[in-house]
Image (spheres, rainbow, N blue to C red):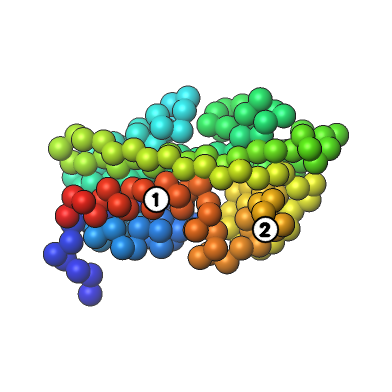
Amino acid sequence: MPNTSKPKLLIATNNLDKVSELRDLLGDCGWEVVSPADVSITLDVEETGTTYAENARIKAEAFSRASGLAALADDSGLEVDALDGEPGAMHHVNGWDGRDQTERIAILLTAMLELPKSKRTARFRAVIVVALPEGRLLEEEGSCDGVIATAPSGDGGFGYDPVFVLPDRGVTMAQLSPAEKNAVSHRGLAAKKMADRLRSLV
């Protein structure tokens, strides 16, 4: 049975992969982490912001208003130096999103086809926002540097993980175990900072 003495923290996303990952990352934050399905919330929020922080705030505030709970949202993206920071926060309106993960990766690799390894540097960036019921906002950011591979490798993770190589490890993010990924990923770093702040509130 859930520990009802803990305040509830709603994960403001319908992406089941993100719910699972954030549950793991926030496991010791002192709050009972719940999904929209757990509290019978069905909500689709349009991401109209132009930055990760704006989009995360829009989602967190919408889910908090709908549920009356504290709500946590993240927005994240891949920034490729040679592509002037794209796909970035505006990936969904700038033509980078295909029908699925495979197509998104294919669009990216096609755009980078002629680039040598030295020009394939990139980073994942994530911003996490918690909207508290009384209107206060908490915000944390994390980033992870890497290089874009010429072909996907690995079966783990999601999004661009199969083509994001960690230079110090020589593997893609998709080749890491969930625990290894959480320790180094942009979302993992931002979530660790947020978990520390959430613990201080309970």
Asked whether 119 or 110 is in front, the reply is: 119
Q: Is residue 173 above or below residue 61?
A: below
Q: Residue at x 18, y 45 (%)?
A: 68
Residue tagged by mark 2?
A: 169
x, y percentage for residue 20?
43, 60
Q: Quadrant of residue 113?
A: top right
> Residue flagged by tag 1: what amino acid is it?
Ala
Amino acid at circle 2:
Arg
Q: Which residue is mark 1?
A: 191
Q: Is residue 105 above or below residue 199?
A: above
Residue found at x 62% / y 29%: 85
Indicate the secondary structure of the residue bearing disc 1: helix
Q: Is residue 52 left or right of residue 87?
A: left
Q: Using the image, determine if residue 103 lies above or below residue 188.
A: above
User: What percent of the width, then of the height, locates residue 191?
Assistant: 39, 50
Q: Residues within 10 Å of mark 1 (few under 14, many from 20)?
A: many
* Within-10-Å neighbours for mark 2: few <14, some 14–19, many 20+: few
* Residue at image point 42% right, 46% down: 190
* Camera-nearest residue between 92 and 150: 150
Q: Residue at x 17, y 55 (%)?
A: 202
Q: Is residue 175 above or below residue 66?
A: below
Q: Name the image quarter holding the N terminus.
A: bottom left
Residue 172, percent across and down? 68, 55
Residue 50 is situated, as x and y percent measured from the top left of the image, at 47, 24
Q: Which of the 4 image quadrants contains residue 156?
A: bottom right
Q: Is residue 95 left or right of residue 192?
A: right
Residue projecting furthest to the front:
168
Q: In whole angstroms, how far apart are the C-alphas of marks 1 and 2? A: 22 Å
